[in-house]
Amino acid sequence: MKLWVLRHGEAEPYARRDAERALTARGREQVRCSTAYLEGKPLDRIWVSPYVRAQQTAALVCEVLGFTGELKTVPWLTPDSEPRYAASRLPDDGHVLLVSHQPFVGDLISLLQFGHLRQPQPMQTASLAELEGEWPLAGSMTLLGVVNS
């Protein structure tokens, strides 16, 4: 299984609610740069946070890649989501891209790689992490690298 974890691009600093913050022009460019790394790689599905900036990030990924596969909004990919719960909801196979937020993405990567949350992976805006393993279980995946735009 291959799992990519993409933090959304730079977002505007304020909105009525955090979930309504939109990408900035710089954020859109960051996402385009990170997405270039995914060109030519197999991708079966994209799961995305319901927050506006993550939705916009996923839409840009689809546009840049010409992706027409499964695009699914899931409620457990928000900044405050529980990584253990999220790991239990991940598919068991395929090539999956998660589009989400810090601190959640750093904690999820740590959980999948080390089996605990004590070493969160630093993730800048539009950072893309690539993990690989047979199953998306705590401590069972290998972090192959992180691309920063």
Image (cartoon, rainbow, N blue to C red):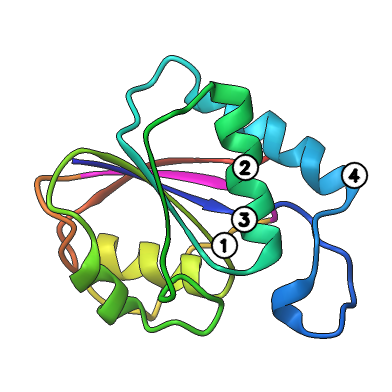
User: Which label lies toward us, 2 or 4?
Assistant: 2
Q: Amino acid at mark 3?
A: Gln
Residue at label 3?
55
User: Which label lies toward us, 4 or 3?
Assistant: 3
Secondary structure beneath dot 4 equals helix
Q: Amino acid at mark 4?
A: Ala
Q: Is residue 78 visible?
A: yes
Residue range in magenta is: 125-132
**Residue at the image position 44 percent from the left and 29 percent from the top:** 68
**Residue at the image position 18 percent from the left and 41 percent from the top:** 1
Q: CA distance from mark 2 to mark 4?
A: 14 Å
Q: CA distance from mark 4 to mark 3?
A: 15 Å
User: Up-down: is 91 above or below 16?
Assistant: above
Q: CA distance from mark 3 to mark 1?
A: 22 Å
Secondary structure beneath dot 1 equals loop
Circle 1 packing at 10 Å, graded few (<14), some (14-19), many (20+), is some
Q: Earlier in the sequence, mark 1 or mark 2?
A: 2
Residue at label 4?
25
Left or right, 117 with reference to 53: left
Question: Where residue 19 sits: x, y (%)?
Answer: 69, 77
Numbered label attached to residue 59: 2
Instruction: For the residues labelled 2 and 3, say whether their Cβ atoms are less than 8 Å apart.
Output: yes
Q: Is residue 8 visible?
A: no
Instruction: For the residues labelled 1 and 2, say whether their Cβ atoms are less than 8 Å apart.
Output: no
Nearest the eye: 141 or 37 = 37
Q: CA distance from mark 1 to mark 2?
A: 24 Å
Numbered label attached to residue 122: 1
User: Which label lies toward us, 4 or 1?
Assistant: 4
Q: Amino acid at mark 1?
A: Pro
